[in-house]
Amino acid sequence: MEESHMLKEMLKNVRKTAPLVHNITNYVTVNDCANILLACGGSPIMADDVEEAAEITTICGGLNINIGTLNARTIPAMHAAGKRANELGHPVVLDPVGAGASALRTRTANELIRDVKFTVIRGNVSEIKTLALGVGNTRGVDADMADGVTKDTLEQAVAFAKEFARKTGAVVAITGAIDIVADDKKAYCIFNGHPMMSRITGTGCQLSALTAAYAAANPDAPLQAAAAAVCAMGICGEMAYHRLSEADGNATYRNYIIDAMYHLDGEELERLARYEIH
């Protein structure tokens, strides 16, 4: 696949295949995750009881596991669904929300990585550092600002992402002001997005669900699929911001992001994406 047409192809496949994505996600953002999947051309299903999690995963094309509102009831469902998805060869995304904020979150994320083969692991830099190194500065679901990726630390962050990808066998997506999407050999450094995206809850959760859809629609290109999803989310954040009036705030912005995803086409995605390959 030519690099110049990669993003367009990834989006085209999502629209064409309309992947059904099983989400075991947090109750703060579950509605937003469902709507971003519908907007991108996919379809959501939410099932987090262990009695049906594996069965539901069987009929889906991809699985998104998000530990944002973790509880003892849903942890066995995450493992059951993940193992079934692996058996079926379905892509699986992990969003380790708040890893490092509590022992339960950190332990659960590490156990999931041990027991389930993930296609993509997506988190902020503090969450990923916690999983990779056992240390981090997670504050709720936000990355510590001192821990963010900057142009000065970009090469170091790319090397770190590639090494964690090699260790886990997953594509690693570290999202923030600069996004890094890497496997063990290649990294996309993505510069799309807008600071206001941090003023609404759930953009990261939405991105993980979106990534699962892109991965399900492009099973032979997980790195490119994840990069395309990250570019798409950032572009929609930019487009939504430019649509705001003086009377609008973060609630309207949230809706405008979903609207932008609904209308996004491959030509726009190619034209507006800003990234470097390292």
Image: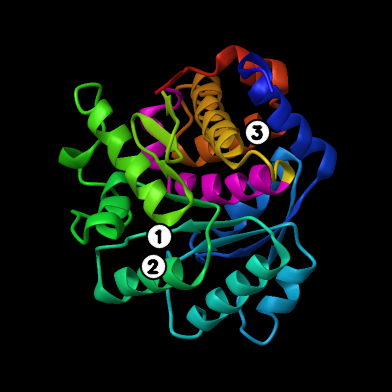
Residue 237 placement (x, y as % from top left): 50, 29
Question: Mark 2 or mark 3, which is nearer to you?
Answer: 2
| Magenta-tinted stretch | 191-216
Residue 173 placement (x, y as % from top left): 43, 42
Decide if residue 69 is in sight here. no
User: Does the magenta segment cover residue 35?
Assistant: no
Q: 259 above or below 137?
A: above
SS class, disc 1: loop
Q: Label 2: which residue?
A: 109
Q: Earlier in the sequence, mark 3 or mark 1?
A: 1
Q: 90 above or below 81?
A: above
Decide if residue 182 is in sight here. yes
Q: Quadrant of residue 136?
A: bottom left
Q: Residue at x 40, y 74 (%)?
A: 111
Q: Which amino acid type is marked by label 1?
A: Pro
Residue 250 placement (x, y as % from top left): 45, 38
Return the mark for residue 96.
1
User: Does the magenta segment cover residue 214?
Assistant: yes
Q: Are marks 2 and 1 in contact (CB under 8 Å)?
A: yes
Q: Report, in whole angstroms, how far the alpha carbon at label 3 lies from the one at label 1.
A: 24 Å
Q: Residue at x 45, y 24 (%)?
A: 192
Q: Is residue 263 found left or right of 95 in the rendered image?
A: right
Q: Earlier in the sequence, mark 2 or mark 1?
A: 1
SS class, disc 3: helix
Q: Report, in whole angstroms, how far the alpha carbon at label 2 lies from the one at label 3.
A: 29 Å
Q: Label 3: which residue?
A: 261
Q: 22 above or below 231?
A: below
**Dot 1 alpha-carbon crowd within 10 angstroms: few under 14, some 14 to 19, many 20 or more:** many
Q: 141 above or below 228?
A: below
Question: Mark 3 or mark 1, which is nearer to you?
Answer: 1
Residue 49 placement (x, y as % from top left): 62, 82
Q: Residue at x 83, y 43 (%)?
A: 17
